[in-house]
Amino acid sequence: MSQHITMIGAGLVGSLMSIYLGQRGYKVDVYDKLPDIRKSTIPAGRSINLALANRGIRALQQVGVMDKVEKLLIPMKGRMLHDVEGKLTLQPYGQKPEEVIYSVSRAGLVSLLRDEAEATNNVTFHFETKLVNIDPDKKSVDFKNEQTDEVTTKDYSILLGTDGAGSKTRRTLESLGMEGFSSDLLEHSYKELTIPAGDIQPFQIEKEALHIWPRGGYMLIALPNLDGSFTVTLFMPNKGPVSFEEFKTKNQVEQFFKDKFSDVLELIPDLADHYFTNPTGILGTVRAQNWSHGEILLFGDASHAIVPFHGQGMNCGFEDCSELYRLLNKHADNWTKVIAEFTSVRRDNADAIADMALENYIEMRDSVRDPQFQLKKSIAFKLEQQFPTQFIPRYSMVMFHHIPYAEAYRRGKVQADILSQLALDKDSIDDINWQQAAHLVEQRLEPISKEFLH
């Protein structure tokens, strides 16, 4: 391949895309401002576990690394709800054995992807190298070595910005006059804690589940790690009576957990110390009207960062890589055509999953406790059994199939209306009018193309 690819950002999406390109024969240089995670440790409180689902799995399969990734995964069959008294309720994600999602360590996965990229012999990573400026007219980029402060200028043929939600590539394009970007912070933030592995039994709570402590306006979640520990994340408002602003002392934090999450307090030694030691992370949504400028293309979180409540940030970014690969095949590596089409193919889908992720926060922290929510979920599973190509629960469409996000969002609204009609004034699934259900599904939902079904 004659074109030289320059990438900004060696995170999950950048590392995966470099494998695609390296295997294709391109020479790729990947620049990242951070140290190489394979040679240094992640700061505490910044290691949010990832949920790998079908969209991400397909991309990993395409580059032939899924068999190695499997060794890093822990299956999660559903949400394990913890109420205030400590009672447990498992809500399965799907109703087929294969309908699970997988907990995976960010550090473990990105390290594996970087190794595989280097194994193509076409990809070179440059760590602790910060983007300073882009000159689209000269097709050049200025970088600063973070250790020596030396600034160098590199020419590029194609420049890919995969440098995350705080993308310097995106901000540089904005400073050059490119418009149509938005960044909306959620009025909630997060803080990470850790349930350590037990001495006798490594996993101190159920291993194969995503644990949720829903409390209305805030919640805790916990995902399993291979060593038996769990990464715990507290999501809470920034301001208000229960908020990050309100809790200023260790006693306040310990009393809060004692009142609302007593079973967790028992599992985390020195919880209050870690609460104040670990940083508070922000949550937000990034959107872009246009992801390209000349030979510069943004994708992944750089163009469409989302909140983490649908477990789709990484999966959506990996699907970007898969779609870019498809377009390279379609247009025989004509990057002008690929870049021109990429935004139109992906933007509506990125906007849809951003909206669904925001909605899912309300569901996770509150709705899951509602008997009507649980009744509708039971009805949805029953309808999926009867109409497997017409009615698939929205969560399943997103997590277990390859239905475009925008289509899943559209169908999800129709299905929500059907479920509301069927569940109105009903307390049990035995009370449902299945003849009415069949009529509504046949009338309002067309079959889904088999190419999108897993």
Image (spheres, grey):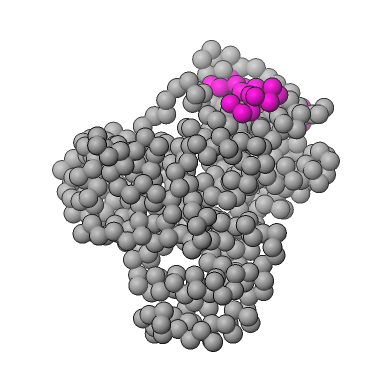
Q: Residue at x 32, y 35 (%)?
A: 278
Query: Is 57 contained in the magenta span?
Result: no
Rendering coords of residue 31 (x, y %): 61, 26
Indicate whether residue 116 is drawn in magenta.
yes
State the image coordinates of residue 373 (x, y, percent, origin top left): 40, 70
Closer to the camera in the image, 65 or 294 = 65
Q: Is residue 365 visible?
A: no
Q: Position of residue 372 (x, y in %)?
A: 38, 74
* Residue 99 visible in the shown view: yes
Q: State which region is magenta.
A: 115-144
Residue toward you, 355 or 263: 263
Left or right of 379, for residue 191: left
Image quadrant holding the N terminus, namely top right
The residue sitting at 40% across, 74% down in the picture is 375
Q: Establish if 411 lies above or below 330.
A: below
Q: Is residue 278 above or below residue 187?
A: above
Q: Could you say where residue 450 lies in the image, as x and y percent from the top left?
A: 69, 63
